Image (cartoon, rainbow, N blue to C red):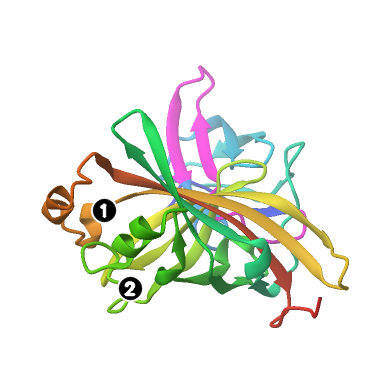
């Protein structure tokens, strides 16, 4: 048996699966808390009979508060709860396939050097797809980066990074990311969960994503822009730290930051420019 139940959705009828239902008694003490499931339905445990305040919250939406009553069996219905976006919340792109434009997308890797400076590398070749779902949180995507396209501006260093000591690009020519969902964290920010394949190793990672907006481009297409970043630990991807010590680059930190600025074009093909 459940306590208070509610179905939480947007004004368009889409469920808000990351919403939280919090219930307090008349003294303000929290007595129950429940997260909405994939259908937007939240259910608390049975409550003592009486009157309560129910508050529904979700990242990017205005809180909703209303009075609720629990019957003798501890149950009660809040019914349909409609969530309105907070001021400044950016509308997500239209559903459908979106293709990464490699000409207007960049991938930058930053590592600390001697603890006081940074070394930056750019991967010049990236492609992939973002599949926007009707419910944006269910969107998926993938990206592929050619490992040999790494460019630090110094040819000798780039050759070393491509070698078996580091990326081993002949054996592992592609770095790939597969994203399986989005979770809203703010008006225009999300976390995209997925898996990164690098140097023959696969690890789950989260990308912190900021959505830049959507609009027409000069070539007759529609574009959307995203910035994403995450931190990686090279030991997770079987890159031998002892080899780097022998190569004389031990002063480079074991943690690297990844920054992606990605433009995607609506549709399955890029427009002719």
Nearer to me, 74 or 37 = 37
Nearer to me, 46 or 165 = 165
Q: Secondary structure at mark 2?
A: loop
Q: How many marks?
A: 2
Which residue is painted at 51% across and 70% down in the image? 143
271 over 13 or under it: above or below: below
**Foreground: disc 2 or disc 1:** 2
Quarter of the figure that contains the C terminus: bottom right
For label 1, count other residues whose C-alpha is less than 10 Å away and answer few (under 14), some (14-19) or many (20+). Answer: some
Nearer to me, 187 or 30 = 187
- Residue linked to disc 1: 234
x then y, percent, for residue 168: 27, 70
Mark with earlier residue (2, 1)? 2
Residue 48 visible in the picture: no
x then y, percent, for residue 20: 52, 43
- Residue linked to disc 2: 169
Which residue is painted at 73% across and 43% down in the image? 89
Left or right: residue 171 compared with residue 47: left
Stretch in magenta: 11-34
Quarter of the figure that contains the N terminus: bottom left
x then y, percent, for residue 178: 45, 70
183 over 177 or under it: above or below: above
Residue 173 visible in the picture: yes
Residue 29 magenta-highlighted: yes
Residue 7 magenta-highlighted: no
Left or right: residue 60 compared with residue 122: right
Which residue is painted at 78% across and 79% down in the image? 271
| Residue 51 picture quarter | top right
């Amino acid at each position: 048996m459940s306590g208070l139940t509610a179905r939480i959705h947007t004004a368009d009828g889409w469920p808000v699966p990351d919403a939280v239902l919090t219930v307090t008694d008349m003294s303000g003490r929290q007595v129950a808390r429940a997260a909405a499931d994939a259908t937007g339905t939240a259910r608390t445990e049975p409550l003592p009979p009486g009157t309560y305040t129910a508050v529904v919250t979700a990242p990017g939406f205005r809180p909703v508060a209303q009075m609720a009553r629990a019957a003798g069996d501890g149950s009660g219905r809040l019914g349909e709860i409609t969530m309105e976006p907070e001021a400044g919340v950016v509308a997500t792109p239209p559903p459908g396939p979106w293709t990464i434009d490699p000409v207007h997308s960049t991938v930058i890797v930053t590592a600390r050097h001697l603890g006081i400076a940074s070394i930056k590398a750019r991967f010049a070749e990236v492609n992939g797809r973002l599949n926007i779902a009707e419910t944006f949180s269910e969107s998926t995507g993938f990206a592929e980066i050619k490992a040999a396209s790494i460019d630090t501006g110094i040819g000798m260093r780039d050759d070393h990074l491509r070698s078996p000591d580091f990326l081993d690009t002949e054996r592992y020519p592609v770095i790939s990311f597969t994203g399986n969902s989005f979770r809203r964290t703010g008006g225009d920010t999300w976390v995209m969960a997925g898996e990164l394949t690098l140097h023959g190793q696969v690890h789950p990672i989260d990308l912190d994503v900021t959505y830049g907006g959507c609009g027409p481009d000069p070539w007759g297409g529609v574009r959307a822009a995203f910035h994403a970043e995450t931190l990686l630990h090279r030991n997770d991807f079987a890159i031998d730290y002892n080899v780097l010590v022998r190569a004389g680059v031990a002063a480079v930190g074991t943690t690297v930051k990844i920054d992606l600025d990605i433009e995607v074009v609506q549709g399955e093909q890029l427009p002719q420019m």
